[in-house]
């Protein structure tokens, strides 16, 4: 439940509740979330707080929102393990609109840019990439 006396903003508390439901499997990948109106009624919140909570979850890549349809739990994606060697440099940044479309990255999810000597830079979606550092002598 929402603790209206808490220092934590109510929209963050609602995001925590929905996130916990996703993590526990009570909301499954592809499943629709309750409507904004239903969430407002259930948690006694205003529309702005509900929309802010959904925005937090969207930015975390946990949900997708389809205009005039609603919000859905984002389907789970396979994790790619990428080996990075000692001389490589890895930076994180937000993707360009073209990269977001090409890599199918939800709004708010950053990318890793892996730069290795004499190799083309690799742009990898951070929400589905695990970087593994290896000794360059291997």
Image (cartoon, rainbow, N blue to C red):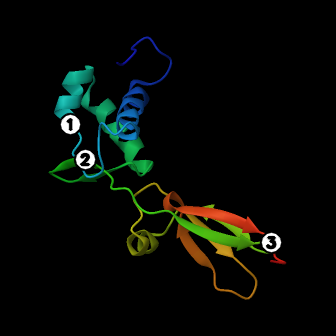
As helix, strand or loop, the secondary structure at mark 3 comes to loop
Viewer-closest of 51 and 28: 28
Residue assigned mark 1: 34
Q: Residue furthest right?
A: 137
Choose mark 3 or mark 1, whichever is in front.
Answer: 3
Q: Which residue is pictured at 48% across the width and 57% down the height?
A: 109
Q: Which mark is residue 85?
A: none
Q: Position of residue 80 (x, y in %)?
A: 53, 67
Taking depth in this image into account, of 67 and 34 the one nearest to the observer is 34
Quadrant of residue 17 within the rendered picture: top left
Q: Earlier in the sequence, mark 3 or mark 2?
A: 2
Upstream in sequence: badge 3 or badge 1: 1
Question: Which of the two discs, 3 and 2, sits closer to the camera?
Answer: 3
- In the image, taking residue 71 as reference, residue 6 lies left or right, namely right
Residue at image x 21%, y 36%?
36
Residue farthest along the front direction in this orientation: 138
Q: Residue at x 30, y 33 (%)?
A: 50
Q: Residue furthest top?
A: 5
Label 1 Cα crowd, 10 Å radius (few <14 / some 14-19 / many 20+): few
**Above or below: residue 24 compared with residue 122:** above
Which residue lies under the disc numbered 3?
A: 86
Local crowd at mark 3 within 10 Å, few (<14), some, or many (≥20)? few
Q: Residue furthest left?
A: 68
Which x, y percent locates residue 19?
40, 37
> Where is residue 78 shown, x and y percent of the image?
44, 63
Of pointers 1 and 2, the one earlier in the residue sequence: 1
Residue 22 placement, left or right of 70:
right
Q: Where is residue 33 shown, x and y percent of the image?
A: 24, 41
Q: CA distance from mark 1 to mark 2?
A: 8 Å
């Amino acid at each position: 439940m929402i603790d209206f006396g808490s220092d934590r903003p109510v929209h963050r508390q609602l995001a925590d509740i929905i996130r916990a439901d996703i993590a526990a499997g009570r909301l499954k990948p592809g499943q629709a979330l309750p409507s904004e109106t239903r969430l407002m009624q259930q948690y006694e919140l205003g529309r702005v707080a509900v929309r802010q909570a959904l925005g937090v979850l969207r930015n975390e890549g946990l949900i997708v929102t389809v205009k005039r349809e609603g919000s859905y739990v984002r389907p789970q994606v396979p994790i790619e393990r990428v080996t990075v060697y000692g001389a490589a440099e890895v930076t994180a940044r937000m993707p360009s609109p073209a990269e977001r479309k090409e890599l199918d990255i939800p709004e708010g999810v950053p990318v890793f840019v892996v730069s290795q000597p004499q190799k083309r830079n690799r742009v990898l979606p951070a929400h589905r990439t695990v970087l593994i550092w290896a000794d360059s002598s291997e």
